[in-house]
Amino acid sequence: MGFEHMSEVIAGMADQLSALVAESFDALTTSEQLALTAQWESFTRRQAAVSHSMVAGLGRAPIEELGERSVAGALAVLLRISKAEAHRRVAEAQALGPRQAMTGETLEPVLAHTAAAVEKGLVGAEHVRVIRRFFDHQVPASTPFDVREAAEAQLAQLATKHTPEELRAAAQRLAAYLNPDGDFSEELRAAQRWLRLGRQRLDGMSELRGLLDPATRAALEAVLAVWAAPGRCHPDGQTPAAEGSVGAEADPSAETVAADRRSVGQRNHDALGAMCRALLASGQLGSQNGLPATLLITAKLKELESGTGHGLTGGGSLLPMSEVIKQASSAHQYLAVFDDHTEEILYLGRANRLASKAQRLALFARDGGCTRPGCTAPAYHCQAHHGDNDWAANGQTNIDELTLACGPDNRRVKPGGWRTYKRKDGRTAWLPPPQLDTGQARINNYHHPNRYLIPDDGDDDSSGDSADCPDSDDRDDRRGDDRAG
């Protein structure tokens, strides 16, 4: 079956779907609607098997033909999905999609029984997640192959009869049977460690979640025993704060300890904040992308003078203006207030290949983060990139030609890959490789979400043939071409 036939099959399915969408289900009885709902669920579950085969096939394609450095990267651009979802699809295809031996013969999927159940429409995405997690995080790698295969067959069979919650309970009990002594390998523990700072809520608060390995937990316990003790690191400033060396501080008095009404969780929170501030103040973090590793904040002069509104940090979070003013009093932070042009030199021409500190601060305030559409990397994780012409192509190190790009995206700009150019309004447009170009957005508004709601009258050039969007020079041996340094 060739490409044209497959494309015709998909087009035919799309036509049939359009016809089904146009149908009204109001005339059906309840039992008929229930029957159709079950039939449709089975059909949609089976579609996942097609996706697994397609993504698995992309995994065997030459990397230079993808237009990105990985299958997940290509899927994220082509389908406009998140990086996390793209990686999930690739990992799922690796487990459930067909494999190919070095000799060219087709092999069964890694989770063959689960893949067969998906192909029949008997199990859904939630069941698959439970089974994949069982093998990724609950079963030691030393488990014999035949035992793992038997366990997968049993879980796949259970998935066809039970809900994901029931399957999860069965999987946990099976894991206990396979590893009764709880002897988990270092590799299994290392694979499970994570720490994630959640999205900032409307009230400014953020959720911190994670799973610590034994060594990190032991270290944190020892630090919190001191820094989170009653009377220490209180945000009201009336008790000894852990700024700098804790050992140099005087122990809080008995009255201070008795007056501390914070919960254990609140003390742990305040200790973490104090630890971060002390580490920033120590100067031991060095530099990052050409600037000292420190807290960067931008604020509008009008809001700063009125004491209202928010400042924007280099990590992309909002900081209440009262806290901005408090932070501005410290010598360890940069507070960039943009009202009129400063006396800093922002136009260097060909005099300097690397952006200056003043230029990087200006880029941070102007762009807020990586300018490639779809990228959420904040300014802390970005480098200065020559947006029109690279340095080797007579590019100018001027503020109106520079832009922010995270390291991976900066290296994506190369012949045959991504291209960038400056629009007439000064914003940076990104053109994807031709094979990944579906007419998606050329401008990234993620770091300035108010722009999503404003009509864009820019000059996006979707053809990619304009002289305003030249190819970048080859960076293979100059990966840090525009890196802050």
Image (cartoon, grey):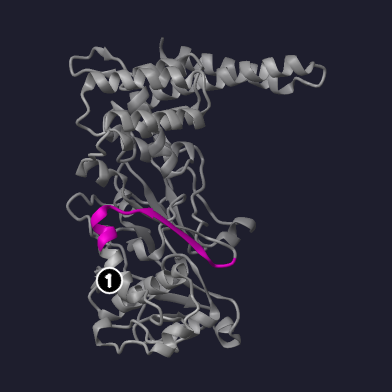
Q: Quadrant of residue 225?
A: bottom left
| Relative horizontal placement of residue 198, taking residue 384 as reference (left or right) | right
54 vs 390, nearest the viewer: 54
Quadrant of the frame with the C terminus: bottom left
Q: Residue at x 50, y 29 (%)?
A: 166
The x and y percentages for residue 137 are: 32, 38
Q: Is residue 393 above or below residue 173?
A: below
Dot 1 falls on a residue whose secondary structure is loop
Verify whether residue 215 appears in magenta.
yes
Q: Is residue 133 above or below residue 483?
A: above
Verify whether residue 61 appears in magenta.
no
Task: Report the residue marked by disc 1.
Answer: 290
Q: For the view shown, which residue lies furthest in the top direction?
A: 1
| Relative horizontal placement of residue 179, taking residue 255 as reference (left or right) | left
The amino acid on which the numbered mark 1 sits, given as a three-letter code, is: Gly
Q: Residue at x 56, y 61 (%)?
A: 201
| Relative horizontal placement of residue 224, taking residue 400 as reference (left or right) | left
Q: Specify few, some or many for label 1: CA neighbours under 10 Å numbering under 14, 14-19, or 20 or more.
A: some
The x and y percentages for residue 414 are: 29, 48
Q: Is residue 245 visible?
A: no
Tell me where the magenta segment starts and ends, as one range: 203-218
| Relative horizontal placement of residue 393, taking residue 122 as reference (left or right) | left
Q: Quadrant of residue 294?
A: bottom left
Q: Residue at x 46, y 44 (%)?
A: 82
